[in-house]
Image (cartoon, rainbow, N blue to C red):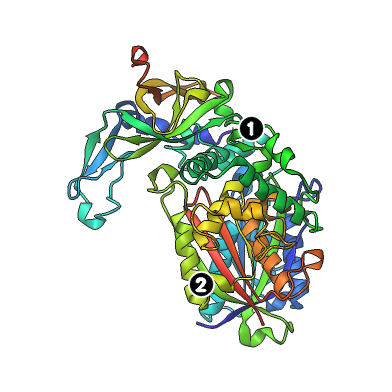
Amino acid sequence: MVQTEGIRYWRDMRARYNLIGRRCGKCSRVYFPARSICLDCHRHSIGKMDPYKLQGRGTVSTFTIVHDGDPRFGVQVPYILALIQMEEGPRMTAQLVDIDPPQVTIGMRVHTVFRKIGTVHTEGVIHYGYKFAPDSMPHLRA
Amino acid sequence: MRDVAIVGAGTTKFGELWNDSLRDIGIQAGFAAIQDAKIESHDIDALYVGNMAAGRYIAQEHVAALITDYSGLSSRHISATRVEAACASGGVALHNAYLAVASGMYDTVVVGGAEKMTDATDAENTEILAASADAQWETFFGATFPALFAMMARAHMQEHGTTREQMAQVAVKNHAHGALNPNAQFQKEIDLDTVLNAGMVADPLGVFDCSPISDGGSALVLMPLEKALSHTKRPVIIRGSTIATDTLGLHARPKLTSMAATKVAGQRALTQAKKTIADIHLAELHDCFTIAELIALEDLGFVKAGEAGAAVAEGRFHLKGGQMPVNTSGGLKARGHPCGATGIAQVVEAVFQLQGRAGARQVKGATTALTHNVGGSGATVTVHVLEAT
């Protein structure tokens, strides 16, 4: 399979490693992932979308336990995938780690941890990025 | 803009069509529609083909030219266009074919949809389908389609108290309908326990909450209404045809328990058709997962937000004894879901119903139908409102 290898994930490395999104210079709405045009201000935001680093703290909006996953995540299955409402406003899609599925609840506080995400099939190149861990286990904080 | 009518409809059987390639499936569907419309190949001005991912499924791009060629139309050099909008490819193809006839550009247009999915393994299917989400910011982190809809389901359960049993009732209903459809992939009734006890795909969605991997093709022939009556006594008029879009990623939408694009596409289509939701006699809704049918029922206004689960469980949308049957074809769940074909297959079912040729699935006296086709987790939605003559 060549599919996912065609995507050059390294282009997003800086934003993915450092949680760098954008903030609209007109209305202050924060975006992650980065957008070059604000969904509210449209053309008035062009050129005013400044880099903005998220602190990596949020709450679980919703989640699922994936039992039948993308082949790239084979050894991780079952894994917890969640939408995280970040304190700065945007919502992010990421895995939850350092917690058992029955312990996950909507509304629980979580923070980012730096982890391996997956590997490219044939070359074995490892992709890194963020996952989220519960705040209630601070000793695991990255 | 001219009134546009459907004068022919046809479909292949859906399922694992082991002996048929994509071109076989596309041609069979188109031929069935052309025969139904009683037109000749020299009548055809243009072809539109909905197809999601032939390049990845069978390493074949340029699908519109392929189908045109093997339909014997290459010597006529007709206009041919492939349309891709994930699982809404069929519905978006129909909207474009509708515009082509309504505008006066073309008089006779064939619009079809086809997908050949079973040549790929289950793992390849998961990966190919996941490409309809945001590849860099959803799929990269482990999102699959069942996972995205499972997260909507859990949010819906939290916000509205919807239960797994209520979601499972959608699968039970649609399998009961599919059992009456000779072209359905699954022509077998199932009970509630079968759905509830099935293995989990993405919690809270189990195997029987998910539509299958399918091969299949469906097609329609469109004409301006004034010409349609010379081809059929019962043309079906396209009263409303709309597309609405939303953010590609689920995470970027303010609401997780509703699809804004469904609300907008539905309202625009009903306004265009000069109808209200109460005028609809039957609907084919995009039940790629059981939760998706519940959300569609709420967003289109058939029930209030949060009430779809109870309404389905009460039987309000069943063919037998229901007030407004939903997915009489079996829906994506039981009829099957060859992605590019689905938006057209829904309209084929509506046409058969409105022309009184739906056999054991016939909804008596139905004159107005609605079809609803979703791409991705709700980034593209098409709605069509159809009326019998």
Q: Amino acid at mark 1?
A: Met
Residue B87 position (above or below residue A59): below
Seen from the viewer's position, the closer of residues B78 and B377 is: B377
Give the left or right position of residue A130, taking residue B112 as reference: left
> Where is residue A20 shown, x and y percent of the image?
28, 33
User: Which one is in front, A81 or B380?
Assistant: A81
Three-letter code for the amino acid on which mark 2 is drawn: Leu
Image position of A134 (left or right of B152): left
- Chain of the residue on which disc 2 is drawn: B
Q: Secondary structure at mark 1?
A: strand
- Measured as percent of width and height from the top left, residue B313 is found at 65, 51
Chain of the residue that carries numbered disc 1 in the rendered image? B
| Rendered view: B309 above or below B71 | above
Residue under numbered circle 1: B200
Quadrant where the image shows the C terminus of chain B:
bottom right
What percent of the width, then of the height, locates residue B171? 68, 48
Q: Is residue B62 visible?
A: no
Per the model, the C-alpha gap separating discs 2 and 1 is 37 Å
Above or below, A41 relative to A76: below
Q: Which residue is mark 2?
A: B270
Identify the residue at horizontal 65%, vertical 65% (top origin).
Answer: B324
